[in-house]
Amino acid sequence: MAPSSLLTASESAANSADGGESHGDIKWDEIEFGIVPTDFMYVMKCSKGEKFCDGSLTPYGNIELTPSAAILNYGQGVFEGLKAYRTEDGRILLFRPEENAERMETGAERMCMPSPSIEQFVIAVKQTVLANKRWVPPAGKGSLYIRPLLIGSGSVLGLAPATEYTFLIFTTPTVKSYHKGPLKLVIRDGLHRAIYGRGGTGGVKSVTNYSPVRNTMQPFNHSFMHGIN
């Protein structure tokens, strides 16, 4: 099934009618690399032993967590990262969101968490992008970075899965390059960020894998782009 068919015509029209297409007042050249709050985020929850359903868009803002949340105490969480691009004719494209959804499913299983289905993930990403489409830079100016998160938001004390899980998506425009100037690389063979294979989490995008180091940008292939509007 093509990703564009996961949103019905009525859903696309509803998301397009928010007036968010006006982005002429945004000074793209002044945006530095970092978090620029956009208008909406997507939130979906489920309890332990249940399945995700009934997610919704909500104004971008802080979330509330109990101090005993599994994500805070035991790092039970995974995340993804993908981008939306605007074409010269105004269309908005996503880069293979289904593969991000599949990787989140794999990571969630490794971290003993339920996860949204591939269809739920892709629909949520598209709805979030369309709700924030005024923040998708013009063609050639950059992209809208999309960060899906899946966390153990429920309370837990001890080595056990959380009682509740939250799937959320937020976005931020990326205009300036992540790296400035030539890269300085350091190779270390005595420090392992995350062990891959049996017993390790190096094969999934667990939040615990990224605390020892700074993330790096990944190359992409434009041939996998999909239109969403």
Image (cartoon, rainbow, N blue to C red):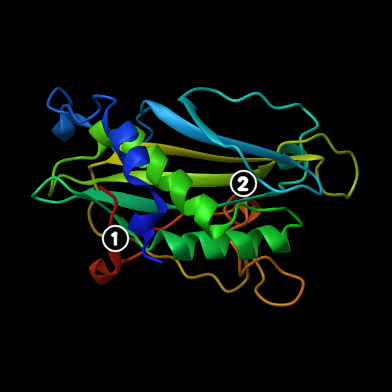
At numbered mark 2, what does the secondary structure look like: helix, strand or loop? strand
Point out the tag, 2 or 1, that comes first from the N-terminus: 2
Left or right of 101? Residue 107 is right
Mark 1 lies on a secondary structure that is strand
Q: Which residue is mark 1?
A: 226
Quickly name the residue at label 2.
150
Residue shown at 36%/64% (left/top)?
Answer: 2
Say above or below: 105 vs 214: below
Characterize the local packing of mark 1: few (<14), some (14-19) or many (20 or more) Cα atoms within 10 angstroms. some
Which of the pair 120/214 is nearer the observer? 120
* Residue lying farthest to the right in this orientation: 158
Q: Is residue 219 above or below residue 40?
A: below
Locate the N terminus and report the quarter of the image it occupies: bottom left
- Identify the amino acid type marked 1: His
Q: Is residue 173 left or right of residue 118?
A: left
Counting from the top left corner in percent of width and height, residue 147 is at 46, 45
Measured from the top left, where is residue 65 in percent x and y? 70, 27
- The span from disc 2 to disc 1 (Cα, nearest Å) is 24 Å
Which is more foreground, mark 2 or mark 1? Answer: 1
